[in-house]
Amino acid sequence: MSNPPGKLIIISGPSGAGKSTVVNRLLAECTLPLTLSVSATTRHPRPGETHGKEYWFLSPEDFAARKARGDFLEAKEVFGRGYWYGTLAETVSSGLKSGKWVILEIDVHGAATVLEVHPDAITIFIHPGSLAELERRLRNRGTESEANISRRLEVASEELAMMHRYTHEVINREVDQAVAELCTLLQKYDLG
Ligand code: 5GP
């Protein structure tokens, strides 16, 4: 018997909105065949991050070679500082083929590119409610320089302006609530 068709889920939201925490909890707790598409990036690992888990950490040369080879479904220089991020086409297609619900945690520009190829993707925008709250969280994380924080806030306000392109909006006031809300909205897609 063949697998039921997989689904593509795009999750975007400003950096510091708690997306990764929410997505990890969703993967562990939501009873759907969810899988995370691990992206490639040229940024350096933060403390505690592992090659192949949060990202495939590639050298700029390696990333460019893979991009030229057509390995990416989309690839963007997310912060305009020379760091690239990209979704691996093979990860997505093999996940979908095996009936998984593949989650892409990507920026708004990457999402727009993926939607051109997969217009039926489920799109979700997660944010912390306000820019002031986002700034508080970025500072609390303690991993970002001042310059980085201002740049991220600038990018965040641009990203918030694109929220209307997403079908669903989840405000991450508190992790348990955001995970429950996301799981409930995804389970509705399981009925069809
Ligand atoms: P971070 O460096 O904090 O892990 O991620 C920075 C931003 O890059 C986040 O907004 C995240 O969603 C985005 N991002 C992560 N992976 C990809 C990807 O494969 N493609 C695109 N376009 N954006 C990504």
Image: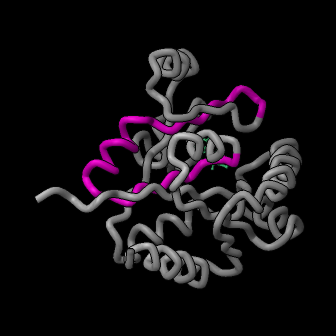
Looking at the rendering, the quadrant in which ligand 1 lies is top right
Res 51 quadrant in image: top left
- Is 160 within the magenta? no
In-front residue for pair 170/120 = 120
In the image, what residue occupies the spot 85% across and 70% down?
A: 130
Image position, residue 125 (x, y; %):
67, 63
Outermost residue, left side = 1
Residue name at image x 75 percent, y 37 percent: 79
Residue 89, percent from left and from top: 42, 35
Q: How many marks?
A: 0
Residue at position x 75%, y 49% in the image:
144
Q: Residue at the spot x=85%, y=50% of the render?
A: 158
For the record, the magenta segment spans 80-108
- Image spot of residue 37 (x, y percent): 43, 48
Please say if 139 is above or below 108: below
Say how the picture is coloured.
one colour
Up/down of 148 relative to 32, above or below: above
Quadrant for the C terminus in the image: bottom left
Q: Position of residue 116 (x, y in %)?
A: 59, 41
Give the answer, above or below, for where 111 lies relative to 21: above
- Residue 107 within the segment the image draws in magenta: yes
Image side of residue 44 versus residue 143, left or right: left
Say left or right for 7 vs 61.
left
The foreground one among 164 and 43 is 164
Figure check: 96 above or below 26: above
Q: Quadrant of residue 179?
A: bottom right
49 and 108: which is toward the camera: 108
